[in-house]
Image (spheres, rainbow, N blue to C red):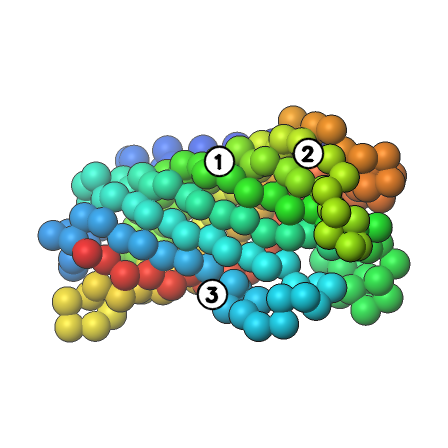
Amino acid sequence: MKKILIISIAFCAINVFAQNNKEIFVNDSIEHKYRISFPAIILGNIGDGGKRTNTQHFELHIKRQLDAKNIVGIKLATWRLFQPMGIQWWDGLLDKLDSESEFYPGYLRETGIGVSYQRMLWKGLFASVEVLPQYKTYLDLDHNKIANGFKLYTSYHVGYHFAFGKKKRFFIEPQIHCQNWVFDTNTPAEFKAIDNQWKSHFLFEPNIYVGFKF
């Protein structure tokens, strides 16, 4: 929790700095107030959906640019977990994928509709926060439902917006984000025993979002 608190304080500090920054961010496509985007990572899940480590991840963002600095949006997401999300890079995350030592005795499907806020800080540099209430479904290895639950998932992002094309309508946003989850309810005992060995947050996940303005 201390790491999450530090990240939250840093995010607030960046936002305060941005509000005092005299330089104005100029959006080449300000006339295009709406945008849709998705994380490029989901492309790796196309095909072979039955593979044990396929997260079947789908995520879509629909946003509206209020002015030169403020962007709000709706986030739609669903994914399937085969092991705890709280295993950090320095805990040997990649090794555990190979060894399968922390795999669940089944799967956890999480689905939700949430909201996001993105603040342009300087030129294309931005910070954003996303809040995603999730409905959880636990499945065994034969895809039979075991239980349902609820989770509140939040993520904090820092990245850079690159627009390109004749009218700057296409864009990519490479970024680093950290996430945590609270109010994690009704977890089956066999899943909870594995979850309890790890954190309720994940730090420093790299990603690239791809989008289009209209």
- Identified by mark 3, the residue type is Ala
Q: Quadrant of residue 213?
A: bottom left
Along the line of sight, the residue nearer the viewer: 27 or 195: 195
Q: Residue at x 57, y 46 (%)?
A: 178
Left or right? Give the position of 190 relative to 8: right
Q: Residue at x 53, y 33 (%)?
A: 133
Q: Earlier in the sequence, mark 3 or mark 1?
A: 3
Q: Earlier in the sequence, mark 2 or mark 3?
A: 3
The answer to whether residue 90 of the structure is visible from this angle is no
Q: Quadrant of the N terminus?
A: top right
Of the residues tagged 2 and 1, which is closer to the observer? 2
Q: Residue at x 74, y 64 (%)?
A: 52
- Residue 140, position in %: x, y? 79, 49
Which residue in the protein does label 2 denote?
148
Judged from the image, the secondary structure of the residue bearing numbered disc 1 is: strand
Q: Earlier in the sequence, mark 2 or mark 1?
A: 1
Q: Quadrant of the C terminus?
A: bottom left
Which residue in the protein does label 1 denote?
131
- Residue 136, position in %: x, y? 64, 38
